[in-house]
Every structure is written in structure tokens, then in C-alpha cells.
Image: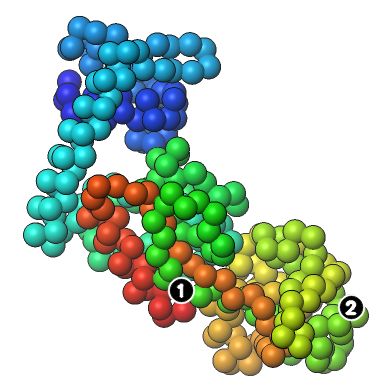
Amino acid sequence: MDTLIGMRVFANVVEAGSFSGAARRLGISNALASKYIAQLEDRIDARLLNRTTRKVNPTEVGRAYYQRCVDIIERIDELEDAIQLQTGTPRGHLRIAGPRIMGEEVLADCVNDFLARHEQITVDLALEERRVDIVAEGFDVAVRIGALEDSSLIARRVASYRYVLCASPDYLKKTGRPEHPSHLAGHICIVNAAISPTNRWEFLVDGKPTSITVKPRARVNAARPIRNMVAAGHGIGLCLLPTVEDDIAHGRLVRLLKDFEAYDRGVYVVYPHSRHLAAKVRAFVDHAATWFKRL
């Protein structure tokens, strides 16, 4: 057995509180995680974990061993990262989390470009409607939109993320063009369920935030389907700007109520505090900061 791998598995079991949680973090099976722990306990001739049906906790020896494991793992990672920085070749496996509402379009393209530039890095990209706990779930980095709640994470703002109101020219020919948010009462709309769970859209009217209840013809939680439905003439939609910029420029979609827009959210790359920032994480954070400037 590779003792260092066993130590990594052990540290992850302690942090996740279970073999299954550690296995998810490391991308291995529960059985393999259990095998590594058993071999590690045999090697040092000591019981490291107390196992129950619901929880796995370190023994007294295990708690002391965990602290030394973390110190050794961090030192080795620091050494490897220092070498990678000198050679200019970040490598390793990177786990990235992001919101589905932007991930299927913008974030996926960002990661695709990142992989093309860093051939020695592999990636797990998890797109979730919920906000993941990147520490507990073993992610290296996450991309988030809007207000940040977890002050224990380091955050770097990489872009503004704008939603704009759009409709097709055919739809507007039939219904007329709304000139004020209050005019939306007479229109059917394509609602982004992720940012408008109560069918209310936000606008700035006379400089003040104003909510307007809209009538949804469809509710969708992904950016591209909303763009497609709006382009097909099924209603007015609150669209993610990067997905419709080309349509607006070529007249396939019309941008509405521009003077009243209120959806300008910050995009952040967040990652846990650590004594050092892994080269693979640093590479992705820097890449995202550059890549998102194009939006």
C-alpha cells in the first residue's frame, strides 16, 4: 500500500465523517476507501477509527494521527506545487462546483478552455441547483453568483453577470412592445425558476427596486432553453446576456426595458483557506478571472 494515499484517505474520512463521503471526495469506491484504512491500521498496528452505523469518528490515537497526517500532506502538496510553479505545468485532479443556471453554457465553456490550456489537469465539474458546501463535499473551487454568505472562504470577483429582458420580433408584432415594467401584466413570460421562484421580476423604477409579478407560460431553470423559447416567440424572457448577445446584435431578439434593468450580479470564484494555494487551483482562478472578462 502507498502510505501517503492511505493517509489522504484517512484524513478525508475524518473530515467527511464517513467512508462514503471520503470516497465521493476522492473519486473512489467505498470498498477501496475501507481497504486503505484497514491496511493503514495494520501498518501502524493501531485502531484509528470507531465505526458505527451512522458515523465514523477517530479514536484518541486517530485524532493525534490525523493532525500529523494533515501536516505531512500539506507539506508534500506545498512541495509539489512549488515545483509545478517553477516548471509552469500545474497538474492533478481539480473538482469544480458551479450553479446549473450558468454552468451549462458559460462555465462549461470556461472549463473547456481551461482544459485546452492545461493538459496535465483533469476535472470534475458538478453543476448543482443548490449551493454546495465545498469543504464538506471535497471541492477544490466553486463559481458562485450573487451575495456570498460563507466568510470562511476566499472569494475573487471575476465578472458581473447580467440578465436582460428579451422577446422575438414576431412576438412583439403580435403583442406590442412594453415600455414600462408595469406593462408586463399584459404579456406572457418565460420565467427563470432559479432566480424568480415566485414569478416576480425585479426592476429599477425611478432608482428604486420594484417587483413585478409576471404570468409564466413556462418555467425553466437553465439559460439556453429560456433563450430558445423566447426566440421561438413563446413569450418575453429574462435571459442570461452571454446567451443572447449574438441574437440581439443580429436582430433575432429584441432587448426590452433596458433603462429599468436590475439584474447585475457578481460572479465569484471561491476556495477554502489554506496555508498554500495549490497550483491547479491558482491556475483555474487566474484562468477564470481572465476568461470571464470577455462576458
Q: Could you say where residue 173 lies in the image, as x and y percent from the top left? A: 82, 92
Front-lying residue, 206 or 279: 206
Colouring of the image: rainbow
Residue drawn at 69 percent across, 74 percent down: 238
Which residue lies most toward the right here? 186
Horizontal and vertical percent position of residue 151:
47, 53
Closest to the observer: 29 or 20? 20
Q: In this view, does 203 lie above or below 283?
A: below
Three-letter amino acid code of the residue under disc 2: Ala
Q: Can residue 288 be seen in this view?
A: yes
In three-dimensional space, the C-alpha distance between marks 2 and 1, rounded to whole angstroms, equals: 32 Å
Q: Mark 1 points at which residue?
A: 159
Eye-nearest disc, 2 or 1: 1
Q: Which residue in the structure is indicated by mark 2?
A: 185
Q: Residue at x 34, y 49 (%)?
A: 273
Q: Where is residue 169 in the image (x, y as percent from the top left)?
A: 74, 90
Q: Quadrant of residue 179?
A: bottom right
Q: Dot 2: few (<14), some (14–19), or many (≥20) neighbours within 10 Å?
A: few
Determine which quarter of the picture holds residue 2: top left
Residue 40 on image: x %, y %: 23, 16
The kind of residue tagged 1 is Ala
